[in-house]
Image: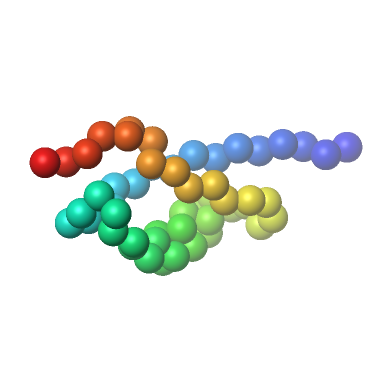
Amino acid sequence: MLSSMVKAKKTKVQTNNDCDVVDVTEQVNKAIKQSGISTGAVILYNGNGEHAH
């Protein structure tokens, strides 16, 4: 029997412009290690949709 596990991690990334590309590899790897999950998928998204001015 397969079991499902979902973990969520919220983090903020500082940018200067709306279209900045930011390498978040280190933050993602840290979150994966802390989760204890060894297989699966990671999904990243901008959850608030707000733009700083």
Image location (x, y in percent) of residue 10: 38, 42
Image location (x, y in percent) of residue 51: 22, 39
Determine the residue positioned at 52% across, 59% down: 33
Rendered view: 13 above or below 52: below
Viewed as shown, does residue 50 lie left or right of 7? left
Visible residue check, residue 30:
no
Where does the N terminus fall, quadrant-wise? Answer: top right
In the foreground, 1 or 40: 40
Image location (x, y in percent) of residue 37: 62, 52
Viewed as shown, does residue 17 lie left or right of 25? left
Query: In the picture, residue 19 is in which quadrant?
Result: bottom left
In the foreground, 47 or 27: 47
In the foreground, 2 or 50: 50
Farthest residue toward the left? 53
Visible residue check, residue 35:
yes
In the foreground, 40 or 52: 52
Image location (x, y in percent) of residue 18: 25, 49
Determine the residue positioned at 39% across, 61% down: 24
Q: How is the image coloured?
A: rainbow
Query: In the picture, residue 2 is in which quadrant?
Result: top right
Determine the residue positioned at 60% across, 37% down: 6
Determine the residue positioned at 32% across, 34% down: 49
Farthest residue toward the front? 19
Farthest residue toward the right? 1
